[in-house]
Image (cartoon, rainbow, N blue to C red):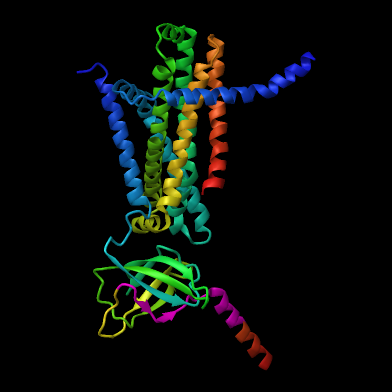
């Protein structure tokens, strides 16, 4: 046995502990490993407004996450937001007339995309686009409309 | 004329010293050999400056996590958002507090001991003796300590963060009766792997190199007297703390 074998063993244990802490932090306390798996297919949808929807926001059906937003780009001609979504391959029986809407979890929570499956016989495949979409509800616009409406009713009285 | 020379040397002194430090760093890097003996002495230094700092880092991390959650819950409760406590605590830990506090602790715990050790070697003529025997003291003495601090600090930071999260779990779930599921799911959706986690770890790698370089350099250039070693040790703590905070701002503003 080498004379400083114990020291080397202790520093080896320290290194292992440190790496274990790194892995634990990355897995447990970050969004790493929260991917939806390697097998996905990509679909897209157009919205007039996505509000603060972000890349990696979840895509849900009936509240269950089935995919995530891969990218959000602006169509430079139509001025619409094109949202590309990766859906896990195990959910490969989503009808092609499914609707998509940008929703909010809770009053001030994060934005996500909710899919409402339709009834068409053919299923969504790689590269398909969703045509029935509903944009995000912008709180300021709703409040503005409400104020405007009450204002006008006051005038009529 | 004498006073003018005095002021010029006051100005050029720090510049010359940082140049000397840079040359010292280059001499250390050029003496990397990847030999078995070198790896073994790096491992020994990892034990001395890394593993032996583990207890203080873990205790401090635990209490930092507890006090952060205490303050965060108090502040967030005012507008009914105490569910977000884990997000606030862990984001500030990963991005700033973990790397910076661990580096400051490390400078006090390990940096000083390295400076004092090398300074004492110099005061007792051990380094001169090595040079006389044609052994490169930079390769044997300085390099293992520098590499060990470069490797140890990120790992210590990871353990500081892990223990701080544990402290936050103990306080917010154990004491304040918050929901464990919300605590973890907030982290897994709100903490970004690259922006928050990797960004903080990258900082702590730079801090590790900074503390290691400052400690080794001040030890190596210490005046070979008792008072000289004392001054060098003080300088190590002061300069590494200042550099850690300055570099933290520079790196945060330019690289994230």
In the depicted view, which residue is nearer to us: B32 or A91? B32
Residue in the picture at 42% in, 31% down? B150
Q: Decide if residue A39 is on the left or right side of residue A50.
A: left
**Residue A149, picture quadrant:** bottom right
**Closer to us: B154 or B11:** B11
* Of B76 and A107, the residue lying toward us: A107
Q: Which residue is most to the bottom?
A: A156
Q: In the displayed structure, does residue B216 sit left or right of residue A127?
A: right
Residue B239 left/right relative to B183: right
**Residue under the image location 49 percent in, 31 percent down:** B210
Q: Position of residue B192 (x, y in %)?
A: 42, 54
Residue B225 in the image: x percent, y percent? 54, 9
For the magenta stretch, what is the residue range?
A126-147
Q: Is residue A128 magenta?
A: yes
In the image, is residue B68 above or below residue A127?
A: above
Residue B228 falls inside the magenta stretch? no
For image coordinates 63% across by 90% down, the residue present is A153
Snapshot quadrant of residue A15: top left
Q: Position of residue A88 (x, y in %)?
A: 28, 67
Residue B48 location (% of width, % of height): 37, 23
The outermost residue toward the left is: A1
On screen, B6 above or below B63? Answer: above
Q: Is residue B108 visible?
A: no
* B61 sits to left or right of B9: left
């Amino acid at each position: 046995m080498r004379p400083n074998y114990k020291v080397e063993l202790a520093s080896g244990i320290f290194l292992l502990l440190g790496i274990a802490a790194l892995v634990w932090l990355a897995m447990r306390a970050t969004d790493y490993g929260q991917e939806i798996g390697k097998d996905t297919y990509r679909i897209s949808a157009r919205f007039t407004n996505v509000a603060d929807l972000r890349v990696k926001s979840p895509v849900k059906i009936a509240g269950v996450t089935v995919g995530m937003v891969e990218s959000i780009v602006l169509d430079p001609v139509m001025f619409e937001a094109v949202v590309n979504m990766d859906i896990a391959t195990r959910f490969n029986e989503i009808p092609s007339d499914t609707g998509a809407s940008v929703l909010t979890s809770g009053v001030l929570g994060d934005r996500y995309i909710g899919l409402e499956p339709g009834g068409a016989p053919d299923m969504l495949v790689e590269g398909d686009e969703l045509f029935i979409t509903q944009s995000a509800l912008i709180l300021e616009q709703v409040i503005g409309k409400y104020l405007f409406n009450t204002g006008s009713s006051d005038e009529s009285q | 004329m004498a006073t003018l020379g005095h002021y010029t040397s006051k100005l050029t002194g720090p510049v010359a010293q940082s140049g000397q430090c840079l040359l010292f760093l280059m001499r250390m890097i050029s003496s990397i050999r990847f030999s078995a003996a070198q790896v073994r002495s790096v491992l020994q230094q990892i034990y001395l400056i890394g593993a032996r700092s583990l207890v203080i880092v873990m205790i401090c991390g635990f209490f930092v996590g507890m006090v952060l959650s205490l303050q965060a819950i108090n502040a967030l409760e005012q507008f009914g958002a105490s569910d977000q406590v884990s997000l606030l605590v862990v984001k500030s830990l990963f991005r700033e507090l973990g790397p910076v506090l661990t580096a400051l602790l490390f400078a006090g715990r390990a940096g000083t001991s390295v400076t004092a050790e090398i300074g004492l070697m110099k005061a007792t003529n051990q380094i001169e003796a090595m040079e006389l025997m044609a052994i490169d003291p930079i390769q044997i003495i300085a390099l293992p300590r520098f590499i060990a601090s470069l490797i140890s600090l990120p790992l210590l930071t990871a353990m500081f963060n892990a223990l701080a999260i544990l402290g936050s779990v103990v306080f917010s779930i154990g004491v304040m009766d918050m929901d464990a599921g919300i605590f973890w799911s907030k982290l897994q959706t709100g903490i970004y792997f690259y922006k928050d986690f990797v960004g903080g770890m990258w900082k702590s790698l730079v801090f590790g190199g900074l503390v290691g370089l400052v400690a080794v350099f001040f030890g190596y250039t210490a005046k070979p007297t008792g008072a000289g070693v004392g001054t060098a040790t003080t300088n190590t703590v002061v300069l590494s703390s200042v550099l850690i905070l300055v570099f933290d701002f520079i790196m945060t503003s330019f690289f994230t």
